[in-house]
Image (cartoon, rainbow, N blue to C red):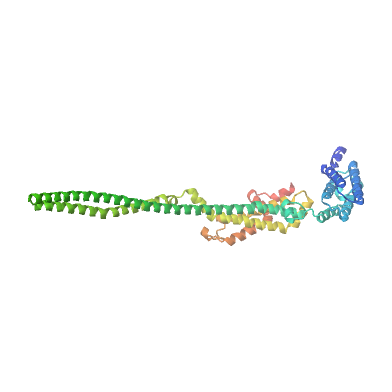
Amino acid sequence: MQVPSSKNQQEDNQPAPELHAEVENLSNIASNIAIDSEMQAKIQNLLAQIKKSLRQKKLSIEMQRELAKLLSLMSTLDYSNPQQVDILDLAISILLENKEDTSSNQNSNFPEKVSDKNCGNLVFVREARRQIAIQSREYPNPFSAIIKGTGGAYNRLLSGLSWFFIIFVVCPLLGIGATFIVFNIFDFTKQDVNNQQKQTIKFEAKLNQKDEEIITAKELSNTFRASLSRVNDELKFLVDEQEAAEENNIFVPLIKIQDIQKNIEKELKFATKKENAEPFSNLEATQNRIAKINPTEIEAGNQNPSQLILFTDWFVKQDLFFISLAVSMGALGSAISVIVRANKFIEQGKAGESDLFFTGFFRPIVGMSFAIFAVALIESGIFSGIFRITERENRNVYLYMAIAFVAGFSERLVEDVVLKTENTLTGFNSRHDKLNK
């Protein structure tokens, strides 16, 4: 095994850049904040010890990180409470006292791992830092800590779960709800417009009917005027003949009088017949026009909807609800599974470099996807012998809720299911090969 060179050892023990920034920040705080002389001297003593240790470059990487986290609390300390400064002084002193033990192991092959073992009080330092953060109320609002993902391990895990729910559950549900509201408003508006169009057409039909009646009345008036004019001419002729006859002692022939009477009766019958016939014919024509206008202009679009509209209506009414149900219940089940096993994930996070935020965010996605897959299998008819659903309208909502929840809660089994499926399809033991690698 190759032993790392002294140059690499020196690079591994270089102080973190953020540690220098925290030291400078601490210096500014000590000089700007109005505190008593005793506390001022204590802070200056801490600064001198930290700078000396950094110049000697005898702090391990893990100790440098912990020291930087401790110094980051200085901006949130309550300097009127000396207990917090005493705890901080004690924690930093314990870290700096371990530098001698750490320097003796710098020539080892794994300086970082050895330094963690040599610093036996590192757990105490971390707990002290956590208590200082709590006492200084660094995160006074728990909801803010969950949304921002700041604070302890539980906050990081819950923050990931919260953002998962916001992105994959709350936002889709709000989007679907907004879509339904928009469709309902559009449908209501469309019905209202159709009703207004019907009323407008009826009103126009009535106006047309009145116009026809007015036109008919004018024609009848003209007819009567013409008939009366002809009768007047006949009567005028008869009066003239009668006056002439009286003056000359000549009588008008009877035949002539009978012809004039026939002409008058003929004109009266013609006018009366036209008066009785034309209003009914105009009314019938107007009603026929109304009967032709209503179905063609208003209902033509509803009688022949496009295929896209039919598919959209069918998908929204039939499948979208059950897909949303599978997503929401699968997410809920997987989130509960993650919360139940929170301690396990926190221990894994402490052992490795995994971030609990991503654990809380991505683990429910696995359960949600597994729930959608389970519902899709049921809908495909593979388990028709177990779930007999003859029609889509007869689908049991509560059955789908239970299946999606159990599938989401079983997100821990997804890896085993995938491995068994892989083994069945390929004939190889994927888990054994994975362990060997």
Residue 350 placement, left or right of 54: left
Residue occupying image coordinates x 23% and y 48% = 226
User: Is residue 343 among what the camera can see?
Assistant: yes
**Of the pair 340 and 255, the residue shown nearer to us:** 255
Left or right for 368, reference 262: right
Farthest residue to the left: give it.
249
Of 248 and 315, which appears nearest the observer?
A: 248
Residue at the (72%, 59%) spot, across then down: 340
Q: Which of 173 and 342 is in front in this view?
A: 173
Q: Is residue 120 visible?
A: no
Q: Quadrant of the N terminus?
A: top right
Please name the residue shown 71% across and 56% down the image: 338
Q: In which quarter of the image is residue 143?
A: bottom right
Residue at the front extreme, as displayed: 247
Residue 107 pos. (x, y %): 89, 42
Q: Position of residue 139 (x, y in %)?
A: 77, 54
Count of numbered circles on the image: 0
Where is residue 91? Give x, y as percent: 88, 52
Residue 251 image point, x, y percent: 8, 52
Front residue (pair 263, 74): 263
